[in-house]
Amino acid sequence: MKAPLIVFALCAACAGSGGLQAPAPRPGAELVVHMDKTEVFEGEPIYAVIELRNPGRDTVRVAPFSLFDSWMRCLLRGTTLAQYQQPGIIVDYFTGPKYRGDPLAPGESKLQSIVLQAYWGVPGPVDHTLYLRTIPSGTYSFLCSLRPWHQADGRDLTLAAVAPNATFLIRPPHEEEGNRVHEFEGLAARLDVVNWQAETFDTVLAWSARRLAADSADPFVPVVLASALTKATVTGRGADSTRAMHARGLGRAIVAFRPRSAIAAYLGSVVQPRR
């Protein structure tokens, strides 16, 4: 059974004497957060898609759309953690005097696919190998906004957008889930880039195939495959076409099982070959 993609968006319907009417296209840009689940267990990678879309009839101008940009601000807030994103790199821009923001045509969207632990959390067992932090158990709100691009005189050149809160629960894992987390952390401990070898990629591929045979939507496999492809490319060890095709084939199997999911979007952005 396919899990639905949960969309946290602000919806409005216009009701008249004749019943519900189709809402008119709204001007401006909308920011929406998509997540697959509203409840996960601690240690499980949490996938999300941040979407900036134009529901109106006219092209709008927006600031650069990326978590590495200062215009994009996302806050993860919970009972034990309140933290803005912690990007590993910072991107800055130099623009000419005629720049008025990036155009976003009617019906078009910009997407940012992420694993929350890559940007939020506290140091944990896979922080130095998979670069994923730990988010403790608790109830969380995920808030994102896109600030306008300002002119030198302070006037806004682009539109601002604020996403409705996405709320979710992280609970302690059950025994079987805890075993899965422990196995994942055990593999992750061997995936540091310094000691990466072609044989390490083989271990990842065999582990991923075994996990997917038991659960076609295993949430740990995508981050492991993405890390393996990156490390093989960076080190040149195991970066042959056979291993890469095998890894991408495993990724395509997950996408086929859950085509409209945040996991599929993440795999499409980091595992599938770039054109």
Image (tube, rainbow, N blue to C red):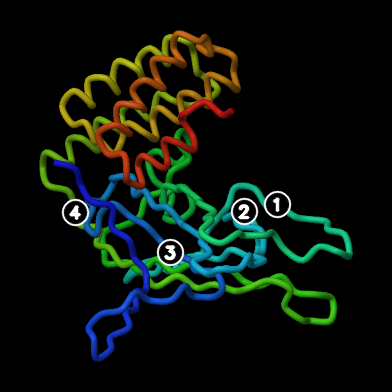
Decide which of tag 3 and tag 1 comes sooner along the chain.
3
Q: Decide: is 195 above or below 122.
A: above
Front in this rendered view, residue 25 or 121: 25
Task: Give the label, 4 or 1, closer to the camera.
Answer: 1
Dot 1 and dot 2 residues touching (CB under 8 Å): yes
Q: Disc 2 marks which residue?
A: 68
Between disc 1 and disc 2, whose residue precedes?
2
Would you name the residue on which mark 1 appears?
A: 91
Q: In which quarter of the image is the N terminus?
A: top left
Q: Nearer the viewer, mark 4 or mark 3?
A: 3
Residue holding disc 4: 172
Query: Tag 1's secondary structure?
Result: loop
Identify the element where label 2 is drawn: loop
Which residue type does callout 2 highlight? Phe
Of callouts 2 and 4, the N-terminal one:
2
The crowd level at tag 3 (other Cα within 10 Å; few <14, some 14-19, many 20+) is many
Which mark is drawn over residue 32? 3
Contact flag, marks 2 and 4 (Cβ < 8 Å)? no
Residue at image location 64% in from the left, 67% down from the top: 60
Under mark 3, the amino acid is: Val
Residue 189 placement (x, y as % from top left): 38, 29
Q: Name the spot of residue 112 as percent of width and height, x first.
A: 50, 51
Residue type, numbered disc 4 = Pro
Q: Which residue is the extreme one toward the right?
A: 97
- Determine the CA span between mark 2 and mark 4: 31 Å
Quadrant hosting residue 165:
bottom left
* Amino acid type at image mark 1: Val
